[in-house]
Amino acid sequence: MTTVAQRMNSFYQLLGLLNDAQRRAVEQIEGPVLVIAGPGTGKTHILAARIGKILLETDTLAQNILCLTFTEAGVRAMRERLLNMIGPEAYRVTISTFHGFCNRVIQENMEYFGKGRLEPITDLERIELVRQILAALPPEHPLRAGKKDAFLFENQLRDLFSTMKKEGWPVDFVLTKADAFLRDLPSNPKFIYQRNTKNAAKGTPKTAQVREVTERMTRLKAAAALYPEYLHAMERAGRYEYEDMILWVLQAFKEKEALLRSYQERFLYIQVDEFQDTNGAQYQLLQLLLNFWEAPNAFIVGDDDQSIYEFQGARLDNLRHFSQLYQADLETIVLSENYRSGQQILDSASRLIARNEIRAVNRLDKPIQKNLRAHATEPGTLRLCVYENRLQELTDLVRQIDDLINSGTAPEEIAVIYARHKQANRLMALLGKKGIPYQAKRPVNILDLPLIQQLRELLCYLDEESRSPYSGEHRLFRLLHAGFFDLPAGDLAQIAVAAQKNSGDPENPLYDAPAARHAPAEGFWRRVLTDPDFLQRLPLKHPEKFDLVSHQLDHWIAAVHNLPLPQLLERLFAQTGLLNWVLRQPDKLDQLQTLYTFFDFVEAEVQRFPRLFAPGAAGGVAGLHRLLDLLDSMDDNRLPLALQQAVEAGPGVQLLTAHSAKGLEFEQVFLFDCVEDMWERSLNGGRGRFAMPPTLVPSAEEDAVEARRRLFYVAMTRAKHRLQLSYARAGEDGKPLMQSAFVEETGLPHENMEVPTPVLLETQALLMLEPESPIVALPEPAVFQDMLRNFSLSITALNRYLRCPLAFYYEDFLKIPGATSEAAAYGVAIHGALQQFVLKMKTDRKNQYPSAEVLLRIFKAEMERQRGYFSENNFAQRLALGREHLRRLHAELVPHWPKRVIVERRIDRVELDGIPLNGVIDKIEWLDDRTLRLVDYKTGAPDLKKTAPPDAGQPHGGDYWRQMAFYQILLQQAHLYPEPVGKTAVAWLEPDKRDTFLMTEISFRPEDLQLVKGLIHQIWAGIQAGHFSNGCGQENCVWCQMHRWNTPPALLARLEEDLDDG
């Protein structure tokens, strides 16, 4: 056991190892101290050592020391360092983040705050509050005027409110700063012509720019004025944000002098780490704690060059204000001896950061020097590698990593740093294929993971079935493929074949005739599972397993209305076999943490809203249904449910963004893909933020560029012994890439790298294995041949086979039902309305098209027929949208429609060289007595790429180009009309970006039709040969997803529209 004397002796030995600047910082324990600590200069060490010095050499108690830092990771690092130095006394020192400190103040003084009943606001609730505010604005409001989308400025408004809280900006402050900027516009040289031009004289204002800036400032002021309403809305909802804790404490300290004085007197020494990252509200809090003393014992540590956030101008104002406020007593110390990197690395990084203007060396009243010196004598290795293309860069990077590991470098001492997470996608794929362990420090949204998609699919099925029997039937086939059910895929295929053969058999009471195309026989799969006699008649391997699943489904559906959500989940985890299945997986640790995160989220929501999430709560809607709505809303708004990792993965190569790399260090560092698009463009691209005047945010435009340069600097200074920068001259598509300007600013010579062709080919082969194509179990050969004899090829089936043979197999061959999406139901209503509208013209004695009111009345009736596929809000929106478009269509297009037409012409039992074809043509028009035009209507947004003829990118032409060629072939082979097809046309029923109804006419040459005929022959041969097994392997393919992960997809709506009803 270490004695106090031994610990003191060790501590003083440690102090003896400090360099001169560090020693000055540690020994200066009285008065204000500002320490500018460059990367790798030991700032955490001196922060802890100074606390130890205070405790050992003064009569100050540990509880009288406050240490504030920016992150919880910083808190842990400081506590651990202090424990090693002074032992258990370290636990009595208050080491906290600013938020943590404010929370402590609130908890210790509840009588002042009275905030006990508030709950933290969720991201989704924040979105809903902002939307409520925007929806209530009058049409003339600057955030609504001339805008169709009421929520156009939603993201900007959320960002502004967050910024106002973080910076401690009252509404009047923002308005005053904006007005001051507008007032000075006429004399601002930036908005005055400095020379004569063709249209303006020197000295006159730039009217267009002034008008644009004035509009932006008007929007900013109008948005800031909504801030009080946002605060009131949060209060009414009983919610708070973490930034509120600082604002509450600030307000309490300002209003209650005794409360502030108690903390001023308690904390005799205050230390602040990462001062460069403190925001306006945090700095105000610090000032209140310090202003009791003329020369407070404040120890401020930071490095302005390592601030990776924007608003650096404002941050430097805080630094300058602190130095000016205490200039008479302030001790300023610069730590420049670097214990991490070689001198070559430091020199190159210093050349880069010297380009920044917004720096302490340029802005502080007292001049300082920040010349980093390496403690190590080895200069370190530094390279800038240039490759012909990204494939070469990726290949050589992985080769170098592999060589380093084989030569003895620990994988966790190798880091690949990049600007954006997406840059690492192919790198992770290649490392995985080569068996090189890695850790990717990136947020994981469990809602995107197959395990949770699988679980949600089961929950959706139980929810729908509990509310209306057989309403979840469209999900069941895919759901039964889930790995935990352990049902043979071949058995499922056999049952699917039987469904297709017997669904219309009037002698078999088990199956009802389908009510519509693609609709399942009502409850077919549920009924099959409960009919052991029927299952025994089929050549199934394990019919008994289906009986077990059937009984379980019945119990789970009943449990939806009887069990609280957490208990329902526990039952499903156990009884489905899901938990046992997870425990058998190679990545069981990750899978278990995923399940835990989901379960913890559900429990938290139930605790927050116990009544809403109770079984059968509120009007008979079970809590499960509310949970699924919540998850859907999170998906719609791209809100993640972050994985909670209780256990870290094993060691591996570190893949991380420059933001995540801050505070870390590695032996070997690779800065990867250093191109302009990734490193120099703002991470929000200028979107999501109102324009801020320089009176409010100094040097805003310049700061945005400098923030990204600081980020590059942080990435470079993570390296201990080796740093390699690299970029490619061309992307995967062959288009040229521009190197980042930051690369050039390092002053490094370019090394042109060459990668041997065999090595490149190996990389290409490995990458082509991703994603793997799934293999599907087909029915027995005799059954398969019997199905072929009854199959006919439509354009929808042809296009689907071309995209993914596996999707074709399930959707067109087995005809597994899918859920009808709202977009599809809307399309059916529009088509139905136009069909009846034209038919009324044809039955009219004068062949006159009916009025617009008749068309709208028909459309409303058609929408009512589809109402079950819409939510209440979306039904009203779609109805209004359709009425608007159809009213305009009637006025602009109907007067020019020909009267000799046929609509919804179904053609089947037609052959092309023995290949059966079918289809439904929306409209056949007689342009004159000698020519026909085939028209197909589309209800989505116009997409001309789909009507384009074959080219290098689309060798078979666009989907709609193939569709119209198919229809022309179909009509030719049917020999229904003597007139030839002269033209085809795709007509969109939704206006394009120019607000006009677009019709694209397509004429086909004989060679075009021959190409499509050849495609029909090719695909028919594939169908005849049973070549369905290899799917497209794409992540957004629901069928490949089902097989790849043995998991049903999260969303079962079709990925592409059915082009006809054939």
Image (spheres, helix red, strand yellow):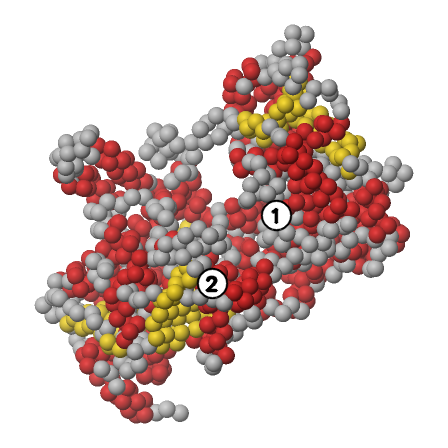
Horizontally, residue 947 falls left or right of residue 793, namely left
- x, y percentage for residue 689? 34, 46
| Disc 1: CA contacts within 10 A as few (<14), some (14-19) or many (>=20) | some
Horizontally, residue 860 falls left or right of residue 558, namely left
- Above-or-below relation of 881 to 1016: above
Which quarter of the picture shows residue 669?
bottom left
Horizontally, residue 502 falls left or right of residue 880, namely right
| Disc 2: CA contacts within 10 A as few (<14), some (14-19) or many (>=20) | many
- x, y percentage for residue 796? 67, 38
At 62% from the left and 17% from the top, the residue drawn is 927
Disc 1 marks which amino acid? Leu
Q: Which residue is mark 1?
A: 1051
Total labels: the figure holds 2
Q: Report the front residue among 1062 and 512.
A: 1062
- x, y percentage for residue 13? 27, 89
Q: Quadrant of the N terminus?
A: bottom left
Q: Which residue is mark 2?
A: 392
